[in-house]
Amino acid sequence: MISRDEAISLWRTQNDDDSLFRHALSVEAAMRRFARRLGEDPEYWGLVGLLHDVDYQRHPDEHLKHARPILAAAGLPEAFIRAVESHGWGICSEVEPLLPMEKVLFAVDELTGFIAACAYVRPSRSVLDMEVKSVKKKWGSAAFAAGVRRDVIEKGAAMLDLPLEELIQETILALREVAAEVGLKGAA
């Protein structure tokens, strides 16, 4: 297994987009939170979240088609690679999320982006004072964060047998832990 520093270095060899890195850190935080909640290894789950879009910047139209060779060359195990591939199920991958780690990644990938979009339009520009009702208020507006696949998030919540509101709450709490690093702390 690689260290977090090595994972960041691997990510940086493939990507240089700051926004995409903040997304990777956001998904990492959500994965760590859910791992702790489920009694799993937060370090391992976090690295899966950190590297889930490792091939996206260079290959946006072929996302996840290049992730396997990149991750395999780094010596990452099959279960890790499969989890990364599963987050694109039905979108850009045929790998169905079956394990809890895979289902969480599938559910929180799009959700972290939606919550970030919700934070950016708040007067505080922060997740630190955000509540589930603020996110749900924007949920039904198709024009708001139009690129976010709400159906994928809902499907992920169902796969986890979690109410959508609980998935949102846990993800908000995860993002609060890394708010400064991911640009969601708000104006000082």
Image: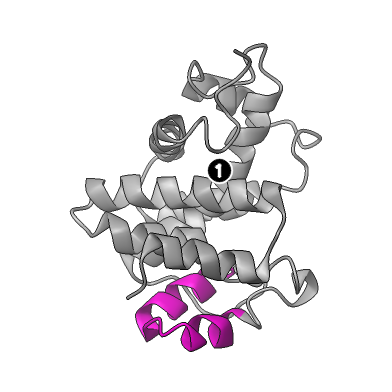
Between residues 69 and 155, which one lies in front from this camera angle? Answer: 69
Using residue 63 as the reference point, say whether residue 29 is left or right of it.
left
Residue sitting at x 36%, y 80%: 79
The image position of residue 119, as x and y in percent, is 62, 25
Q: Residue at x 65, y 82 (%)?
A: 66
Camera sees residue 53: no
Quadrant, the N terminus:
bottom left
State left or right for residue 16 relative to residue 105: right
- Specify the farthest residue to the left: 39
In the rendered view, does 113 fall on the left or right side of 84?
right
Mark 1 Cα shell of 10 Å, populated few (<14), some (14-19), many (≥20): many
The answer, for residue 9, to whether it is visible in the render is yes
Please report the residue visible at 40 percent of the width from the left and 81 percent of the height from the top. Answer: 76
User: In the figure, 144 relative to 128: above or below?
Assistant: below
Q: Is residue 66 magenta?
A: no
Place of residue 173 in the rendered image (x, y in percent of width and height, measured from the top left): 40, 31
Amino acid at dot 1 = Thr
The residue located at (44%, 67%) in the rendering is 6
- What x and y, as percent, mark residue 117? 68, 33
Above or below, 57 relative to 19: below
Relative to 167, is 64 above or below?
below
The quadrant the C terminus occupies is top right
Q: Is residue 84 above or below residue 43?
A: below
The main secondary structure of the magenta stretch is helix
Image coordinates of residue 50 in percent, x first then y, are 49, 59
The residue range painted magenta reads 67-88
Q: Is residue 185 left or right of residue 33?
A: right
Tell which of 163 and 107 is nearer to you: 107
Name the secondary structure under disc 1. Answer: helix
Which quadrant of the view contains residue 10?
Answer: bottom right
Residue indicated by mark 1: 112
In the figure, residue 3 lies in which quadrant?
bottom left
